[in-house]
Amino acid sequence: MTNRGYTILYTLAAFFIMSCTKPYNPKVIASANNYLVVEGTINTGGDSTIIKLSRTVNLNAATTTNPVTDATVAIQDDQNVSYSLQSLNNGYYTNPILNLVNTRKYRLSVTTSDGKIYLSDYVTPIASPPIDSIGFNAGSNKQQGAGVQIYLNTHDPNNNTHYYRWDYVETWQFNAKYESQYISDGTQIIARTPAQNIYSCYGNSISNNILLGSSAKLSQDVISQAPITFIPSTSEKIEQRYSINIKQYALSADAYNYFALLKQNTEDLGSIFDAQPAQLTGNIHCTTDATLPVIGYISAGAVQQKRIYINETQLPVAWTPTYPYDCELDSAYFSAPKSGVNEVQIYLIPLPNSSIPAVQFFKGGPAPAGYLYSDVDCVDCTIRGTVTKPGFWQN
């Protein structure tokens, strides 16, 4: 048989194999499960207690979040004192400062709009020791490439904690690709005022990985250079100034094991060599229907936090951030060279408008010939951040 004949034969075989393949949609993907998910910590220190309520969604659902906004949420102690949490209408429930007594035990109470009652087990508060320091290394490694590795150091001199969890909020200062010096008021192009700045903004994000540390197998309760997050050298987070605020939670052994298993089930899956998913057993239960699963584990204790700043001057000069959109400047003439059309009137003045004037340009005379402009993604930083400086921000 010729090579051409083999090619035809293999093509036909592949066609028949593919035509016999049927899509496999396991029942779990389209199941109607709508379980309650509870996230948060009862904060007995001088900071807010924030509890997030949501419900599970199907794997094939169009949405990935399903917040519970109409529940009644409270903290209860073992002496029948109750502390209400207020809904923020986005699935979060909070009380600024509860001033709880560390010698009592506490539990979370949730009543949903369908009348179901959920209670956590009573838990003993565990106060976290302070965070010793937050540091960073700016360099390169084989796994992640060039970037900034943020790490944390902590210890308990009383040798009592052993189990730790962390989360964080990142904030950074960044610029749009081009600075717009002008704005349309609907009838003409006018100069922007400082209050209309859309060039320099502040962005932020919260951690979405489970960060754990344990000193249980060490002779001393010391956590050294625990990795928190890695920022690639091309990220605009480190374009100008970056800050990270890390919160530290002390856990019981049971709470640590729960979060370790949750991390395994959600982050350490994907290849045949990874551990298989395991059943989660939290400490929250539906008292009106004992067969109804609940996802979550409630802990209590004083939370510690620490913030650091990183300036661009502390990083390698060769690092250049990559703008997240493809951008270019185009020109709009008051009188186009060939047609004489007033492109500024047509393209830039009518509102609303996704094309924003950046700067004037000239063609051999004292009067401007028109404006250079670009898309809103390239000129307006407020689509990804805010121009309002955070209250904690230090210059």
Image (cartoon, helix red, strand yellow):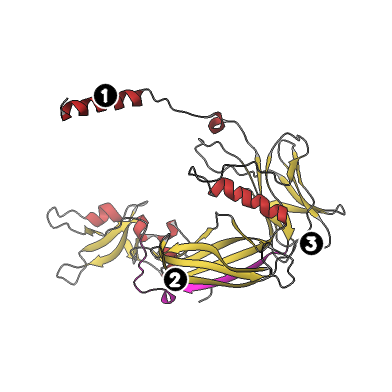
On screen, 230 above or below 272? below
Q: Secondary structure at mark 2?
A: strand
Q: Amino acid at mark 3?
A: Leu
Q: Is residue 113 visible?
A: yes
Considering the numbered disc 1 on the image, is that residue within a helix, a strand or a loop? helix
Tell me which residue sits at (34%, 63%) in the image. Answer: 177
Circle 1 residue: 12
Q: Residue at x 30, y 57 (%)?
A: 327
| Mark 2 and mark 1 residues within 8 Å of each other at the beta carbon | no
* Residue 186, visible in the rendered structure: no
The percent coordinates of residue 95 (x first, y second) are 71, 57
Of 130 and 219, the residue lying toward us: 219
Q: Earlier in the sequence, mark 2 or mark 3?
A: 3
Q: Which residue is mark 3?
A: 100
Q: Earlier in the sequence, mark 3 or mark 1?
A: 1
Specify the farthest residue to the left: 338
Q: Is residue 353 above or below residue 367?
A: above
Drawn side of residue 241 relative to residue 227, left or right: left
The quadrant in which residue 18 appears is: top left
Mark 3 neighbour density, 10 Å: few (under 14) some (14–19) many (20 or more): many
Q: What is the three-letter code of the residue carrying label 2?
A: Ala
What is the CA distance from the residue labelled 2 to the residue labelled 3?
Answer: 41 Å
Q: Which residue is mark 2?
A: 138
Furthest toward the front, the residue is 1
| Residue numbers of the magenta segment | 302-322
Is 308 one of the magenta-colored residues? yes
Question: Secondary structure under badge 3?
Answer: loop
Q: Position of residue 187 (x, y in %)?
A: 33, 57
Tell me the amino acid under the disc marked 1.
Leu
Q: Position of residue 168 (x, y in %)?
A: 57, 62
Q: Whole-Å distance between the Cαs marked 2 and 1?
A: 54 Å
Kindly report the distance in space between the C-alpha atoms of the residues bearing marks 3 and 1: 73 Å
